Amino acid sequence: EVQLVESGGGLVQPGGSLRLSCAASGFTFNSYSMSWVRQAPGKGLEWVANINQDAGEKYYVDSVKGRFTISRDNAKNSLYLQMNSLRAEDTSVYYCARELRFFDWGHHYSLDYWGQGILVTVSS
Amino acid sequence: SSELTQDPAVSVALGQTVTITCQGDSLKTYYASWYQQKPGQAPVLVIYGKNNRPSGIPDRFSGSSSGNTASLTVTGAQAEDEADYYCNSRDSSGNHWVFGGGTKLTVL
């Protein structure tokens, strides 16, 4: 059974830092790209960052570039999100998600498994 | 990057059929995926690709696409289908993800 379990959330002051972790199990972790997606209270889903299987490619939404860093440790089956210079608008539930890649007259993608999410609150 | 547009809210009578749509330029290149999210829960993938349902998703959920528009159809909506539904796809660059704003489905 695929499982993704986030940890590391909590309350942090503006300008502070936090590191989220996502522990993966039930699948071959190093065969999949992974993403972080967040959801502000009462709002929709927003993709934050993703990383490919060997961490050679990383991409970020513009609003977190230069502040957040995505990484992974394939030996530990873990995904991370280092969040620095946090702002009130970063307050969200953060989800890790597995990326499914499939071929159908070209490469296509989906997010097929999600963790339960972890709340990050940025407030003084 | 690109945007995906969804109607904010849709309603359907119990047992009837409803279609939720998603529009965006990226859908000319990439299939949309559809996610169901109930209050306090993580999103769950319900449709991906041309019209693929993950294991455990009822066959009353189906997907289709044409041009820049993707559609999620619920045939014979049940009370438990009341939820927020989000579409997403890779953006035009192929490296980022974009989400629609979500559609709140109410089953009357």
Image: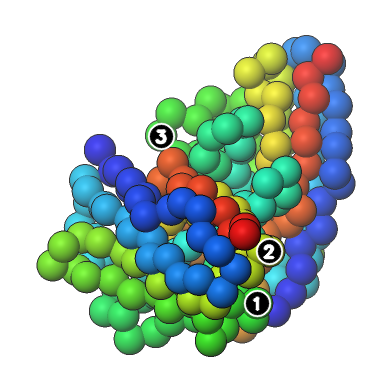
CB under 8 Å between discs 2 and 1: yes
Q: Can you name the residue that lies furthest to the left here?
A: A75
Quadrant location, the C terminus of chain A: bottom right
Q: Nearer the viewer, mark 3 or mark 2?
A: 2
Using residue A91 as the reference point, say whether residue B74 is left or right of it. Answer: right
Kind of residue at disc 1: Ser
- Tell me the element at label 3: loop
Rounded to the nearest angstrom, the CA distance separating label 3 from label 2 is 36 Å
Q: Position of residue B70 (x, y in %)?
A: 73, 53
Above-or-below relation of A3 to A107: above
Label 2 crowding class (10 Å Cα cut-off): few <14, some 14-19, many 20+?
few
Rounded to the nearest angstrom, the CA distance separating label 1 from label 3 is 35 Å
Above-or-below relation of A86 to A5: below
Q: Position of residue A41 (x, y in %)?
A: 68, 46
Which labelled disc corresponds to residue B55? 3
Q: Residue at x 49, y 76 (%)?
A: A84
Which labelled disc corresponds to residue A63? 1
Which labelled disc corresponds to residue B85? none
Kind of residue at disc 2: Glu
Kind of residue at disc 3: Ser
